[in-house]
Each structure stands twice: as structure tokens, then as C-alpha cells.
Image (cartoon, grey):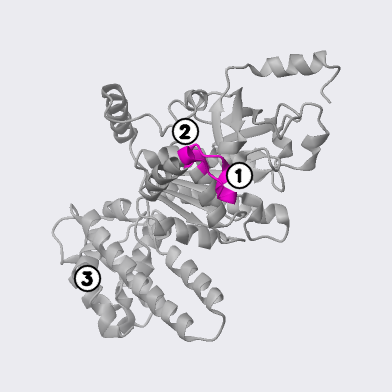
Amino acid sequence: MTADHLATLASPEAEQSVLGAILLDNGAFDAVGGLLEASDFHRGEHRLVYEALARQIIACKPADLVSTYELLKAEQDEPAFGGLSYLTALAHSVFSAARVRRHAEIVKEKAKLRGVLAKLDEAQEIARGPGELSAKLDAIAGLLNGIDASNSARMPKPMSDVMLRVIDGINAAAEGSATPGWPTGFPTLDRYHNGGLRAGKVYVLAARPSVGKSSVSWQILEQNAAAGRPCLDLNQEMEDEEIGQRALANVGRIDYGHIQTGQLTEEEWGRVAEGVDKLGNAPIWVDDEPSLTLRAINSKARYVRGLKVLLVDYLQLCEGEGETRSAAVGSVSRGLKKLAKQLGIAVILLSQLNRKVDERPDKRPQMSDLRDSGEIEQDADAIWFMWPLENELDAEVRSVGFEVAKNRGGKKGAFVMNFDGARQRWSESTRRLDEFQRSKARAGGFE
């Protein structure tokens, strides 16, 4: 990027106005100190002056024309910062500090634009350089993903502003113009979460293999897509065609085995067309790339415009950073929580459980059963557990326990779900959890 090109993405006037306002009234620094860094100024002399002003004010010293000049002169050659004459010109460039915040925002916006172009130039160098295509794409995705909110500075908000938004939300929910959450399609689960999923939250669904966490989470995904919310399934375990077959069985109420063999009844053939049409028009995206890095997840999530619900299947198959497996899994868990807040999405994160749960008579999971990392429990806003309630896993409809074991925004509790394996379809059971415990006890024990 040429110097002339960079100059078109700068506002010397805004930079001068900010510096002049601080020289005029050191109190102006309170409005911009949390937003601007010295590196945000395009002109070198402006970076030096801002740094000198900030150092003095943070040290609770007056930062006037003379003190700033003396500080700069002691550390820099006068041409580097323009000398006393330039500082004097800055001090007389404004008559009021009233608009300093807006001028600082202009300086910040220009700095971000220069950063974007610099990243794009770096991406071009990577693309033209040596190496495998996959490695290049991963490196470029990492560069571009680092441009957004990580560079933005947030200022503290007064509680009065927060309360205004809270009241607006309560009124909207009371009037029916806004839903308190995004329904999962399971009434008890929605009740525990005061309406359903919420933006910025991470919901961990953990179970042992073959209990049904992938299919139940897909049904939640489809429920939200049917309501018009864009959804993304990052499935590292199944290929996209298998995902499509299972989805068709679920939506069309078609026997999954018949879909695999092509031996459908006449009635099922009719439902195939309806299911394909419904799924084809739903805002659902599917990706079956294995061993996803956090950067790749970030890139794919941003690819889907207006994304609301992200399903990651499953955590332990992701590639994280850290010297131990626990640290690597924890890095992905933390990164997904950050992504949920940045994009305003709900993340359903599937997780395996360790083998100790199989040794327990009732197979009911505990927090300590979360596999590879205790950090999962810390990062999650809610943790859901699933476990088999019956030994007949090949039964046409089997019952599974479902527990909300952690819930920062609602209630905890457990209930029973029924799984129709032939149609890959879940529903809430009318039976109570303690009925299964009593029936096993009457049979002479849990196992």
C-alpha cells in the first residue's frame, strides 16, 4: 500500500482537532482516552503529541503547551513533532472541546480502514507465496477474522441507558412484538430457559455416543430455521449427504431406513417432495469439514449472513491451541463464547462425556463427566445432559433422560424425551423420570 493511498484514509483535520481539544481542556481526554491509541493517528507527529499528552494526564499532571513541549523536546528531535510552533498551532486550532468525541471516532474509523487494507495486502502476499492452499486459506481467514470487534473500543455505559433497553424489552415481550427467546420446539426446555435460546449464549449438550445428541440438536436447529432464523450446522462427524437424509426423515416423517435403501412406500414418496421443498427453502447451511480450528469456525459463521443459531458437532473433534488436550479444548470453548457475543448468535455446542458415566448404575451424567476440560463448565451459559433410560436401544421408540444441569438464565430440572429412531424424530414424553427409576428398582436393580 503506497503512502499516497494511506493518506486518503486519514483525516489530519480530525487528528488536529482532537489534540487541540486536549491541549485546550485536559478533561477532553476523558472522552477519548478509552477509544484512541497513539497508533490510531496517521501522522507521526500526531502520534508523538498524543502519547505525550496521555502520559501526563494519566500521571495526574497538567498537560499544557509548555509542559508537553518540554516533555517532547527531552525525548525527540523537534522536527519529529513539529516543535513549539506546531504545538501552538494545534492549541489554537479549536475554540471548544465539545465535539472531541465525534472527531476521535473519525480518527478511529480511519485507522480501522487503514488496518483493513493492510490486512488485505498481507493476505495477497500470503496467496502469492509458497505453501499448500489449505494452509494459505487458514492463514488468510485468521487475518480477516481479526479485523472486526477486536479493534473496537467500548466505553462504559451508564445504568440509566441499560434500564431504558430493559424496559423496552419488557414492553415488547408484553405486547407480543418480541419473543422472550427462540423456541427449541420442546415446551419443558423452553420453560426452563424462559422462552428458549438467546443471542450471545452457549448451550452445551453432552452425552455418550449414540444417545441422540446430534439428532435432537438438529431438530432444534430446524425449528428455528422454520421460524426464519438462519442456522448453520458444522458437523465434523457426518457427511453432508447423511445429514440431509436424517433431516429429510425428521421433517418428512419418513422411515430413515427406507430413505437409505430407496424402498419407500407410495405415501412416503409424497412426503419426500414436501420434505425436500421445506428443507430446500429453509435458511439452513451445512458444513462437514473435519477437525475445525476456531478460526475456521469463525470464518464459516461469518459467511452465513444474519446467522442466529450455530451448531458445532462436536467439541472434542475441533483443533484447539494448547500444550495439553484439556487446554486445547478449553481454548475452543472460550473462543465460541466470544464468537456468540460478537455475532449475537446462540451456539449449541455438542460434547462427549468420559467413560466413567457408563460405570454408574443409572447412567446419569454429572458435571465431572464432561470430557477433556473442566473449562467447558465455566464457559457454558447452560449445560444439558442426555442419558438412556431403557436398555432396549433398538426399540422403535425409546426414552431418554434430558437434564438442564446448569442454567445461568433460568431454571434447572430434568424430564423425559422420546426418540422415534425410524423417523429421527424427538418429542417430550408424558412419563415422569422417577417412573423409570421405580421400574428398574422393581426389576431387581438398575442393571
Which residue is under mark 1? Answer: 257
User: Earlier along the polypeptide chain: callout 3 or callout 2?
Assistant: 3
Q: Nearer the viewer, residue 69 or 138?
A: 138
- Residue 255's place in the image compared with 7, above or below, is above
Q: What residue is rendered at 58% in x and 60% in y?
A: 292
Image side of residue 352 versus residue 383, left or right: right
Which residue is under mark 2? Answer: 184
Indicate the position of residue 318 as horizontal and vertical percent values.
62, 57
Indicate the position of residue 14 as horizontal and vertical percent values.
21, 66
Question: Which quadrant does the C terminus fall into?
Answer: top right
Q: Quadrant of residue 302?
A: bottom left
Question: Over which residues does the magenta segment extend?
Answer: 249-268
Mark on residue 430?
none
Residue 144 visible from this viewpoint: yes
Q: Nearer the viewer, residue 265 or 108?
A: 265
Q: What residue is rendered at 49% in x and 45% in y?
A: 248
Indicate the position of residue 285 as horizontal and vertical percent values.
44, 53
User: Earlier along the polypeptide chain: callout 1 or callout 3?
Assistant: 3
Which residue is under mark 3? Answer: 11
Residue count near mark 1 (Cα–Cα under 10 Å), binned few <14, some 14–19, many ≥20: some
Q: Nearer the viewer, mark 1 or mark 3?
A: 1
Amino acid type, label 3: Ser
Indicate the position of residue 68 as horizontal and vertical percent values.
32, 67
User: Earlier along the polypeptide chain: callout 2 or callout 1?
Assistant: 2
Judge whether residue 253 is colored magenta.
yes
State the separation of the CA atoms marked 3 and 2. Answer: 49 Å
State the separation of the CA atoms marked 2 and 1. Answer: 26 Å
